[in-house]
């Protein structure tokens, strides 16, 4: 009887170890896949955009945001590119939020090369191409206001406001 109890305990222990190894493998595989997917650029679901935007920029989106879309890339230095249409109140909210001490601003005009606008926007075409979507087309901008951050609290951003269309483009990264 004693031998039988020992055998049953050993079998149960062996099955428990096999189950633990299998569960560990599944957990590691799922975590690795999640981190891999999270660090690749991807379009965020609309419901997740405000939280990721706030985390990276330290700012809130305006109350009115139509057509809200974003490309997000996680990892060590997360980046987000957000596009939305808003009203005059929303544009003023963005100006107040991002035109802080040390930031620079200037007017842009159509035909100016992108590097004259903002070096930070230069990674957006690469992300869009990888995803097969288009949230930002430099050629569609006739004029607007460009605001760039001073890099406070390791936050860097470029904000482009197309005032004619009420469209706001924000590229931000957290280092």
Image (cartoon, helix red, strand yellow):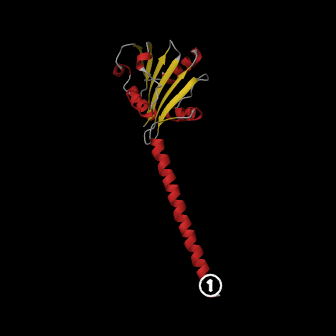
Residue at the image point whose x is 53% and y is 32% from the top: 53
Q: Give the total of numbered labels.
A: 1
Query: Which quadrant of the figure has residue 103?
Result: top left
Residue drawn 54% across the image and 18% down it: 91
Q: Reply above or below: 169 against 19.
A: above
Q: Residue 47, image x and y in percent?
A: 60, 34
Residue topped by disc 1: 4
Residue 15 location, x and y as percent?
Answer: 57, 71
Residue lying farthest to the right in this orientation: 1
Q: Secondary structure at mark 1?
A: helix
Question: Does 17 sit left or right of 145 as displayed?
Answer: right
Quarter containing the C terminus: top left
Q: Is residue 74 left or right of residue 4?
A: left
Residue 164, image x and y in percent?
50, 12
x then y, percent, for residue 105: 42, 18
User: Which is more toward the observer, 100 or 81?
Assistant: 81
> Residue lying furthest front in this view?
132
> Does residue 52 lie above or below 23 as drawn?
above
The N terminus, quarter of image? bottom right
Other residues around mark 1 within 10 Å, as few (<14) / some (14–19) / many (≥20): few
Name the residue at 56% across, 24% down.
Answer: 67
Q: Answer with left or right where residue 102 lies relative to residue 17.
A: left
Q: Residue at x 38, y 20 (%)?
A: 117
Residue 46 occupies quadrant: top right
Nearer to us in this view, 155 or 40: 40
């Amino acid at each position: 009887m004693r031998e039988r109890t020992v055998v049953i305990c050993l079998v149960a222990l062996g099955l428990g170890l096999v189950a633990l190894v299998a569960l560990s493998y599944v957990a590691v595989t799922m975590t690795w896949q999640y981190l891999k997917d999270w660090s690749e650029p991807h379009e965020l679901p609309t419901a997740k955009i405000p939280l990721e935007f706030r985390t990276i920029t330290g700012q809130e989106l305006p109350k009115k945001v139509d057509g809200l879309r974003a490309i997000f890339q996680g990892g060590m230095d997360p980046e987000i590119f957000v596009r939305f249409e808003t009203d005059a109140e929303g544009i003023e909210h963005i100006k107040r939020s991002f035109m802080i001490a040390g930031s620079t601003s200037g007017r842009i005009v159509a035909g100016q090369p992108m590097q004259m606008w903002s070096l930070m926007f230069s990674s957006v075409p690469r992300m869009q191409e990888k995803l097969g979507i288009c949230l930002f087309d430099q050629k569609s901008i006739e004029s607007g206001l460009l605001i760039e951050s001073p890099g406070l609290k390791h936050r860097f951003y470029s904000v482009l406001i197309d005032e004619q269309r009420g469209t706001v483009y924000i590229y931000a990264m957290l280092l």
